């Protein structure tokens, strides 16, 4: 289904090009369902809820890639967070499946029309029927301020679940974090697109 999301994103690029920039807006929270996705204004980040074939096979995930109108860009990285808390990071290859760089908590594991949502910094998403949440914000990546999509499983406290993993992606690279007993995240793997 990711091809459908790439097609939606490419078609909507023209519409976004004529939209007024800098207008006052309030942050929104979007609830995604299977095969829905989102892209973030001003970035090449594209995310989708899908059943993973490569990163966490057979598991429902939120997966994010660095993409252009032709799809995921070779020599960049993609990340996935599964409903069971599994995370994976892989390098995108040209004409071949992605190469797994890191995988944690190995997996055990509709007919509706998918929707593509356009988000901006300050927006967030939840995945229906799961504890997965994603937030779009600005943070430092490789020493530079970047628009970042970060996804993790949320606890009742509305903080990341203690002892869980999370994923993140920017136009500059991708990362996997681990949350300690106090929900404080520490990166365990950071990669830069193109390397």
Image (spheres, rainbow, N blue to C red):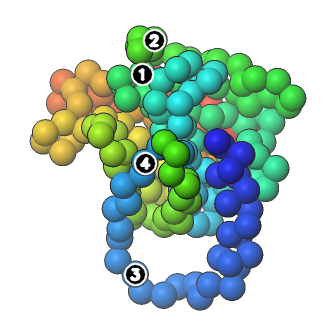
Q: Alpha-carbon distance for marks 4 and 2?
A: 23 Å
Left or right placement of residue 78 versus residue 145 in this view: right
Q: Which residue carries the number 4 mark?
A: 33
The image quarter containing residue 136 is: bottom left
Marks 2 and 1 close (CB-CB < 8 Å): yes
Q: Is residue 156 visible?
A: yes
- Left/right of residue 106 with respect to residue 101 in the rendered view: left
- Cα distance between the residues tagged 4 and 3: 24 Å
Spot occupied by residue 41 in the image (x, y as percentages of width and height): 58, 66
State which quadrant residue 184 falls in.
top left
N-terminal label among 1 and 3: 3
- For mark 3, what is the residue? 25
Classify the position of the N terminus by image quarter: top right
Element assignment for label 1: loop
Query: What percent of the width, then of the height, locates residue 94?
Result: 85, 31
Of badges 1 and 4, the one in the foreground is 4
Classed neighbour count for the residue bearing mark 2: other residues with Cα under 10 Å, few (<14), some (14–19), many (≥20): some
Q: Nearer the viewer, residue 34 or 130?
A: 34
Residue 106 badge: 2
Q: Is residue 146 visible?
A: no
Badge number at residue 86? 1
Count residues near mark 3 (Cα–Cα under 10 Å), then give few for <14, some for 14-19, many for 20+.
few
């Amino acid at each position: 289904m990711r091809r459908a999301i790439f097609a939606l994103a490419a078609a909507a690029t023209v519409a976004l090009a004529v939209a007024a920039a800098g207008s006052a807006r309030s942050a929104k929270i979007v609830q995604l369902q299977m095969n829905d996705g989102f892209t973030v204004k001003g970035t090449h980040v594209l995310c989708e809820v899908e059943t993973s074939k490569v990163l966490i096979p057979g598991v429902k995930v939120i997966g994010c890639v660095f993409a252009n109108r032709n799809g995921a860009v070779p020599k960049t990285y993609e990340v996935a967070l599964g409903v069971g808390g599994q995370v994976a990071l892989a390098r995108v290859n040209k004409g071949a499946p992605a190469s797994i760089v890191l995988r944690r908590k190995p997996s055990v594991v509709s007919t509706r029309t998918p929707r593509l949502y356009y988000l901006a910094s300050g927006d967030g998403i939840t995945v229906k029927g799961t504890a997965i949440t994603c937030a779009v914000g600005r943070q430092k990546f490789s020493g530079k301020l970047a628009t970042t999509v970060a996804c993790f499983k949320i606890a009742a406290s509305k903080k990341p679940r203690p002892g869980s993993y999370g994923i993140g992606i920017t136009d500059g690279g991708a990362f996997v974090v681990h949350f300690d007993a106090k929900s404080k995240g520490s990166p365990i793997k950071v990669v830069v697109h193109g390397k």
